[in-house]
Amino acid sequence: MVAVVGFFWHDEIKVLIEKWQNKAEEQAPGLINQGLDQAKNWWETYGQGWADQFVAKMTSQGKVKIDAWLAEQNLNEYGDSQGTVYTGGTPLFNEATGQSTDRYAYLLQKFPDLIKSLNLEQYLK
């Protein structure tokens, strides 16, 4: 019985699924961009303070893990390609505001996935 019903409704189900798929494909870019904007706004608003607090609680072993990861990736101490030159000598100093950023907080903002991939939470005091 189910096979008979499925056979007759096959075309209707196919059309319904295609409509859902088309709607999802139309809405997905907007939803993705909305999520990216929200994430960017969160980092701009809370990211620096959050990263500063995380680094303040991190032990030296956690910092060694980050430095080892940078070396494995062949990146410089700021997470950029080797040989990168910076205005003022470092990306950690904002010449306009006169404010400096902790290197590890800078790296966690740049690579937030390091917390999970290196299991940095185990290195909190």
Image (cartoon, grey):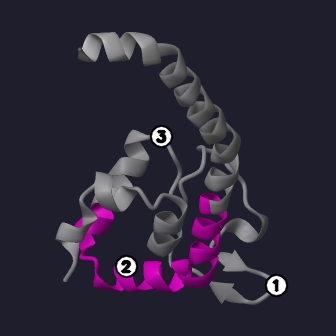
Point 50% across, 86% down: residue = 49
Could you say which quadrant of the image residue 115 lies in? bottom left
For marks 1 and 3, the one nearer the N-term is 3
Residue linked to disc 1:
96
Drawn side of residue 96 relative to residue 8, left or right: right
How many angstroms separate mark 1 from mark 3 (CA)? Answer: 30 Å
Drawn side of residue 47 relative to residue 37, left or right: left
Which circle marks residue 55 in the picture? 2
* Magenta stretch: dominant secondary structure: helix
Which quadrant: the N terminus? Answer: top left
**Mark 2 residue crowding within 10 angstroms, few (<14) / some (14–19) / many (20+):** many
Point 17% across, 68% down: residue = 122
Residue stretch rendered in magenta on the structure: 35-64
Which element carries disc 3, helix, strand or loop?
loop
**Mark 1 residue crowding within 10 angstroms, few (<14) / some (14–19) / many (20+):** few
How many angstroms separate mark 1 from mark 2 (CA)? Answer: 24 Å
Which element carries disc 1, helix, strand or loop?
loop
Which circle marks residue 74 in the picture? 3
**Mark 3 residue crowding within 10 angstroms, few (<14) / some (14–19) / many (20+):** few
What amino acid is at disc 3?
Answer: Asn
Q: Decide which of 107, 11 is in the foreground and name it.
A: 11
Q: Position of residue 36 (x, y in %)?
A: 62, 59
Q: Decide which of 95, 57 is in the foreground and name it.
A: 57
Tell whether position 85 is magenta.
no
Q: Position of residue 94 (x, y in %)?
A: 73, 80
